[in-house]
Amino acid sequence: MSIVYRSAVSNFIFLGNKDATSALRGIAVLSHELLKETQEVELADVLRPRGQWASSNKPLTTTPPYEDLREFFDLPWFRRVWVIQEATLAKKNVCICGVAIFDLISVVRAGVWLLHKEHFLNDAGLTRTLNRALGLFDLLDHDQGYYATHRHTLYNLLRMIQGLECKIPSDRVFGIYGMLEHFQIPGWQDLRPDYALPMERVFEKATRTALADMNGDLLPLQQVSHVDEIAMRRGPSWVPDYSISNQDERLSNELRAQFEASSGSKRDSQLDFGFSNAGQLAVAGFVIGTIVGTTAPIFCKRLSTAQHLSERFDRIEALVEQHCPDDIQSRFALSTVPLTLTGGQRASCSELMEWEAFRNSMNGSLQGTLEHEVRDKASLPASLGLYLDTLEACLNRKVFAVENGFIGLGPLLTDCNDIVVVLEGLQWPAVLRPSMTGFYFLGVAYVHDIMDVR
């Protein structure tokens, strides 16, 4: 199939009969603003300075038709898994929508530019939708996209398509087979479509292949987000469930504060759980400690008011006081925003003072329902911005205490007697559950002050 796409002069994409005039006018305006702001700098350097995605602190000069743009980028074609390799491998992509004909690359560039302005968008649905445009941009733009300077990896491709739709879950792997072959990703032959294989086996093969391609980097494990303990025990717990869309509300949000375990404190390896025919994975690392207490799971629907939020923080602070009563800084630093702290560093005195003032005034200043998906944080008071970031970081997770005083934010299934570990090649600490034959991998965690191992 990849030969067909590569051999064609143009790939014609029919987006439907919908009148997209308003959306395309908005795209034209965005394209003009993009050109103005990138006259003297490469677009790639604006979007990803120092290699990391960055949102702009400069608003758009005109207000685009947000609703029309959201409907346009949410057309069925943009949501489908199978179209990705079709568009990526083609020499040129020409779109037809209603009576309009246009080049796909110009559209996705405009979409990415709007995503770059996400702090000034008031439509969370539009922000999520534009992430699909970002995935296409990185693949199609050979000068400014992510893959212009990075090699294609199975891990990145699997992450990108997890938000797309397919009728057969295994197509989240099989749907990119032509790309794996074209880019000669190591192990691509092992992922040839075979619909006789159970879904779980397909996902395990894909994860093994992704891990083998990364020279000891355990990044694929960071996609693990179990929502059901029975399902976790059925297959290798270190294999992500690619059948669940990354837009699924049951999944935990990604943690942003991170560190490289390989550059942190060293101890003799205390872990060695298998990478064998029994579905085990062998890794190296050391144990931080056993979990001795947790809060209840933190769900969005239970945090709709300031009162609920305040009660949640009360429980967190009670947990910290019980297990490390002398560490007042951890008490406040954990209650504030784990993902805004840098690599587990302690909160500054000014941050602690601001947070304490915010906590004291919370019930008076945040009455009523609070939207957890508010994106226009640039216009919000700093304390309310902290609240929103905290809420997003903690959804579908638990706060836990470790026997030696560490406090962390762990996966949804975290419980007492689980252990917290640092694994070489993983950017976050992990939570494991001991079993008769090894360990279950529950997922990654944020652990305050983890790099200052006592």
Image (tube, grey):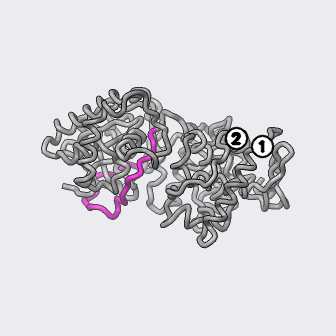
Q: Position of residue 49 (x, y in %)?
A: 50, 65
Q: Label 2 sits on what residue type? A: Asp
Tell me: 49 left or right of 266. right
Decide if residue 159 is in sight here.
Answer: yes
CB atoms of marks 1 and 2 within 8 Å: yes
Helix, strand or loop at disc 2? helix
In the rendered view, tell whether residue 276 sits above or below residue 415. below
Helix, strand or loop at disc 1? loop
Q: Residue at x 51, y 49 (%)?
A: 119
Q: Cα distance, mark 1 to mark 2?
A: 8 Å
Quarter assignment of residue 40: bottom right
Q: Label 1 sits on what residue type? A: Ala
Task: Confirm whether the magenta stretch covers residue 273.
Answer: yes
Q: Residue at x 59, y 48 (%)?
A: 131
Task: Confirm whether the magenta stretch covers residue 401.
Answer: no
Q: Residue at x 42, y 40 (%)?
A: 392
The local crowd at label 2, few if under 14, some if 14 to 19, many if 20 or more residues have their Cα within 10 Å, is: some
Tell me: 78 left or right of 19. left
The local crowd at label 1, few if under 14, some if 14 to 19, many if 20 or more residues have their Cα within 10 Å, is: some
Residue that numbered label 2 is attached to: 68
Residue that numbered label 1 is attached to: 20
Magenta residues (range): 252-274
Quarter assignment of residue 253: top left
Count of all numbered marks drawn on residues in the image: 2
Q: Position of residue 227 (x, y in %)?
A: 45, 33
Q: Position of residue 226 (x, y in %)?
A: 45, 37
First in residue order: circle 1 vs circle 2: 1
Q: Quadrant of the C terminus?
A: bottom left
Q: Residue at x 55, y 39 (%)?
A: 247
Tell me: 348 left or right of 157. left
